[in-house]
Amino acid sequence: MEYDFLAIEQKWQSYWAKNKSFITTNASEKPKYYILDMFPYPSGAGLHVGHPLGYIASDIVARYKRHKGFNVLHPMGYDSFGLPAEQYAIQTGQHPEVTTKVNIARYREQLDKIGFSFDWEREVRTSDASYYKWTQWIFIQLFNSWYNPETNKAEPISTLIPKLSGFHDLTEQEQAALLLNYRLAYLSDTVVNWCPKLGTVLANEEVKDGLSERGGFPVEKKLMKQWSLRITAYAERLLNDLDTIDWSESIKEAQRNWIGKSEGSSLFFKLEKNDDQIEVFTTRPDTIFGVSFVTLAPEHELVSKITTADHKAAVDEYCQSAKNRSERERMAEVKHISGVFTGAYVLHPFTGKKIPVWVGDYVLSGYGTGAVMAVPAHDSRDFAFAKYFENALIEQSGENPIKIVIKSIEDRHEGVHTDGIAIQTSYDAKDGVCINSDFLTGLEVKEAIKKSIAVIEERGLGKGKINYRLRDAIFGRQRYWGEPIPVYYKDGIACALNEDELPLILPEIDKYLPTENGEPPLARASDKWKKDGKYDYEHSTMPGWAGSSWYFLRYMDVHNHHNFVGKDAVNYWQQIDLYIGGAEHATGHLLYVRFWTKFLYDIGLIPMQEPAKKLINQGMIQGQSSFVYRAGSGNQFFSYNLIKDQFDKISLDELEKLANEPNAKANIIELWKKSSYHQYGKVTPLHVDVNIVDNQVLDIEAFRQWRSEYNNATFVLEEGKYICGTEVEKMSKSKWNVVSPDDMISKYGADCLRLYEMFLGPLELSKPWNTNGITGVSNFMRKLWRLYHQGDQFTVSDAAAEKAELKILHRTIKKITYDIEHFSFNTSVSNFMICVNELTELKCNKREILEPLAILISPYAPHIAEELWHRLGHQESITYARYPLCNEEYLVENSFQYPISVNGKTKFTQEFDLAMSKEDIEQAAMQLASVQKLLDGKTPKKVIVVHGKIVNIVI
RNA sequence: GCGGAUGUGGCGUAAUUGGCAGCCGCGUCAGACUUAGGAUCUGAUGUCGAAAGGCGUGGGGGUUCGAGUCCCUUCAUCCGCACCA
């Protein structure tokens, strides 16, 4: 019997299930190892081959660690609240809970087929009341906490009250309103990203280029009363602690950007005509003497107040139009400069000079103070603005607005300006020396910044300040399929539920749509859904990232009914040792889970400040789409190369003709767009199911069967074949390029799929899926099987192994161990291949070799390993078998094939005894006839001998 | 614009960390076996060259006896952020 993977894999999967092979306890003599995958959102489309990539890697590590004697926590669950299920519910009327259950069942079935060693008794689902009870519970802890800047941590709100003078004189309402300014979960009027099409607000990271990440609908800014989490309180710690974790530099950098710390100073500019003052934030207080105007964001509260009567109309109109533009429009017009003068002036804090105040939409209301001091000579945005409005500015201040106050070290700008000669660009760099700057003149930028802040503070003009780009996280969604926020309203005051009232169950509603007057779907709940039968609950639900911000803790103690996680459990498991997931969560999930972890640490519930010690981002598996090319609107299809050649010819001819025309560039671009075979002429490329294409060759019969409209299709072939075009795109149903793991498994087996996914390349790298190469791995599997068998016979012998065999084994142990420890799974697969090739060559069938080999490969290909282990006579599962150790003795070499090179170029190799000294090798080498020939009578300038490495002769 | 990553055969990739570039696999070619082959086995396969021998890790420069690897510079592609003062 040849290698029958289907039977073997089924047998061992049911064995593992029946024997609960991967159940983990929370107490053990063994060292712990916690390895976690980012849990999936169970979509209706099921898994494609890209999804399990990270799971396979983590499963290999998990199984390896078990062999190595660790107590391994390796759980899996589902991020089962979210928008797609709800959108589907809106379309079909099906309860999201129902579709979610179906999808989860399908995911589970697919995951089981791949042979993962998850501890399924610890499964979590964020949409289960037993889970979201604790998500709500954590929300209440956030609500009841404030961030104490003195202790630099979150504390119960009760420690705040004594610090608030006159608190007890306030009415209940006033007290509640005051406390909301401090709570870590708070309600406030916030400018939010409102997506009318989805009918909900979105977080910043859910908006891409002014469109919603899900669905791609337009997003606008809107002022709304919203629940938010005060993540900004943790900005500094989130930034600093990045240095304590082993995450990829790109993720850390993305988080640093997102937090966006900048140090500088606030500075007040007094208005000329009244007592108001404008507060600006600047990172360049050293350029204070270069200020030539001040710009306010259109939304700035002082705009209407300071604008003079004769400018009012223009300013009002400008602000109105700025507000009405959508985010997307505003972004698209970044390069378009616009602004308007308010008629007001402020006084320079040091020189007392009059400085005009403008409104410009290049100033963002949400950052800093929404006002900037413009230094055109040293800030490119101010420069562009000043250039655009140069004449007006000169008129208002009576001088050139571009005042150079920093001289670059290389003197690039010296002499260019000062007396009205136009400079071409601003000099933004933070190095150089101050000039024309009163008390700062002569100082280096760095010192000037320090000095200027000192003087600003001394004279009471402002204060050194740190600003963050990070905004508080908006926590309410006007949607149905999420955790209800455990809050009710009593006389207009938002009150948290008591812990014993949790979970607040998501109520049934008639339709998953907003109410007629625009309230969220939960407003549709029956009158019974009220606190004590009378108080309204909060109608918005939590965002998708709520449940995922702490799920790693729940896995530790999933059945705990008294606590979100038990003390003993979390003290035992501590941090995730290895976390594997996609890089797309860089500034979303991965920032929030760090935030919640720090909060839970602060209030003394968990002993660690960071969720994951090490993080690996697996690359995306893209799809490789196939195309057929339909001529006209008929049913005739041209093979790819026929069409492609035709295009190239046409485009070349056309290009030549067009290149001489006046607006050549535009024409060529036009033509270029058209000539690509996607859109050219009457030939339409159509996605074709990749499952009926083999190595670019279309299965014509299958194509005719695929869809009724192609029943009578005709084909223009090349060499008797229809060749399809290909393109790398995202793997998705609509592109017909989805490869399902189930198909791969039924054809090649789960072990083969696991190995092949790893074989594709480094885990972190994104790459298109290409099924072609899998046959190589499939051959390997059979070769491996044949080492242990001859025909039907299991033929492992107990004879002692040869030295050569032992050497192969121990070299492989060494390499595979190194590879796993370094997460280099692709190289371990080729090392297995080399090992099996060499053992096959030697016709090795010794137990002494093949038994350790089965353990070595078991993390990668667990089913075949179990079967071989069983056939080797073991009654127990291979799961906990001791991992073999490398015995260096077998690897010791006596001699080495030295490459002999001349001037660094290798000419040939020569074997020398490793015991030989450098000098002896040099001498022996020089005597070789081939060396003498190369020398051609010349004396070498130098001979370099590196022991055990190389001989290099320099002529 | 800022930041991160990546560039090696026809393709996916490897290189003991500065020491024989191209391991392993796919594909291709040739051969064997075969009624047949999308099976199996053997061999070849970076490139130019008949060969000897050159040339080769995106391009250019440098350090070194020796560079895919280190330094400078430049180009290309992908990803993230983006008027953040």
Image (cartoon, coloured by chain):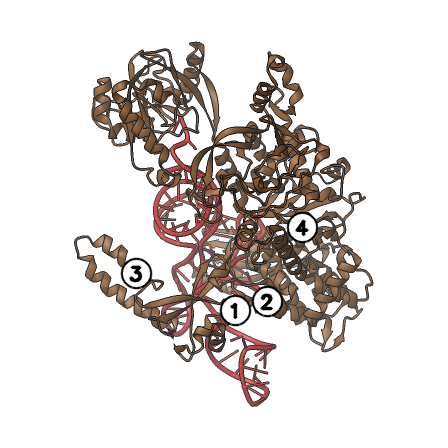
Residue A721 got which mark?
none
Image location of residue A551, percent across then percent down: 66, 42
Mark 1, residue position? A691
The 10 Å Cα crowd at callout 3, few under 14, some 14 to 19, many 20 or more, is some
Mark 4, residue position? A76
Rendered residue at 47%/72% (across/down): A707
User: Which colour represents chain B?
Assistant: red
In which quadrant of the rendered view does residue A322 lie? top left
Disc 1 to disc 2, how far (Cα)? 9 Å
Mark 2, residue position? A743
Q: What amino acid is at disc 3?
A: Lys
Output the chain of dot 4. A
Q: What amino acid is at disc 2?
A: Asp
Mark 3, residue position? A674
Give the left or right position of residue A444, taking residue A152 as reference: left
In which quadrant of the rendered view does residue A361 lie? top left
The reply to whether dot 1 and dot 2 touch (C-beta < 8 Å) is yes
